[in-house]
Image: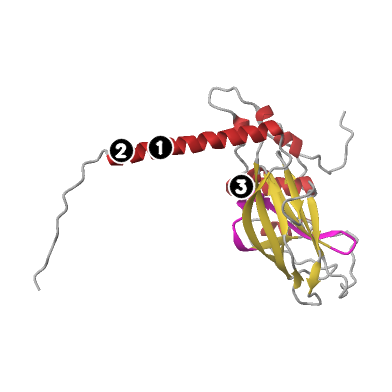
Amino acid sequence: KGTRTKSDNFDPMPCWAAGAQMAALNLQTNDLPTQLHHALFELNGGRGYVLKPPGMLGAAGGGATAASWPPPRVLLHAATLRPLCLFGLPPRGTDRPHLAGAGGSLHGHVPSLSVALGRRRKTSPRGEDELPSLSVELHAIGGFSCVSLKLPPATARSRQLVGAKGGGGGEAVRYGGAVHCIAAEKQQTVLRVAVVDDDEEDVAYETCVLGVLRQGYRVLHMRSAQGTRIRNCYLLCHVSFTTQVNAWVGEGEMMEYVRSKEKEMEERVDEAEAEVAKLKGLTPCSSSSYSGAG
């Protein structure tokens, strides 16, 4: 019988990993499952449908199932995030919703969707020694993932904190260092960057699929705890990409990868030798000269 009255959500990740077509969530509750949902379904232009990974869909005619996904990966995608400055974080107890866009008109009818009405919050100003930290997290639907402060990663932690280096008091908060976000399935891994107050309470955040990040200097438009973007609140960071060998992969998968690379190299050598033989068999063309009168 239906006796559950809470509006919190279950973790949809196992459902998506199993190939479920739909996972029902209470979207009025902007908890972590809802945040991950919005990040994933921003793909495909936010149309509400996202294609499953090819390994989960299987080949034409059937055969492969969700149990065959994710495949073992020897090389991992590594996105290095260097947070630089946080601009425009609202003072404690202040709401500054960004009401432009398709959802902005809803604020006039249901303000609680954009501001924290009825919620007890700190109102004291942040002191110079209370600069907010950043929490960098990875949430993978499938495959290995970790967040590390150095390469190669020594542990499989999914969250790292980055402390502020200065600023505050009306100025931008400055950060330093690098955070390495490593994932086997970048299109099925959600990156979450949160601004964390001194008591580790999230005061702002942004989520996106790791695979949509582009290299270079990028800006994340931060959201409030209600999921509404905060007007003029941005995190400036630098993004770069590399690859890492998966130290957590089994010996069998590693040997299979080495053999596949050997086969690939042999095929390339055969193609090069065939091209050389083809060039040697060509008849030399007669040369002609052109001279112009002075």
Residue 70 shows up from this direction: no
Judge from the rendering whether residue 78 lies leftward or rightward of residue 92; answer left or right.
left
Judge from the rendering whether residue 203 lies leftward or rightward of residue 228; answer left or right.
right
Q: Which residues are magenta?
A: 197-218
Are the two marked residues, 1 and 2, in contact with CB atoms closer than 8 angstroms? no
Quarter of the image that includes the C terminus:
bottom left
Labelled disc at residue 43: 3
First along the sequence among labels 3 and 2: 3
For the residues labelled 1 and 2, the Cα–Cα distance comes to: 10 Å
Amino acid type at image mark 2: Lys
Residue 92, image x, y percentages: 85, 68
Quarter of the image that includes the N terminus:
top right
Give the structural element (helix, strand or loop) at label 3: helix
Dividing the picture into quarters, in which one does residue 48 lie?
Answer: top right
| Few, some or many residues within 10 Å of mark 2 (<14, 14–19, 20+) | few
Query: Which of 263/37 is in front?
Result: 263
Dividing the picture into quarters, in which one does residue 68 lie?
Answer: top right
For the residues labelled 3 and 1, the Cα–Cα distance comes to: 39 Å
Residue 251 shows up from this direction: yes
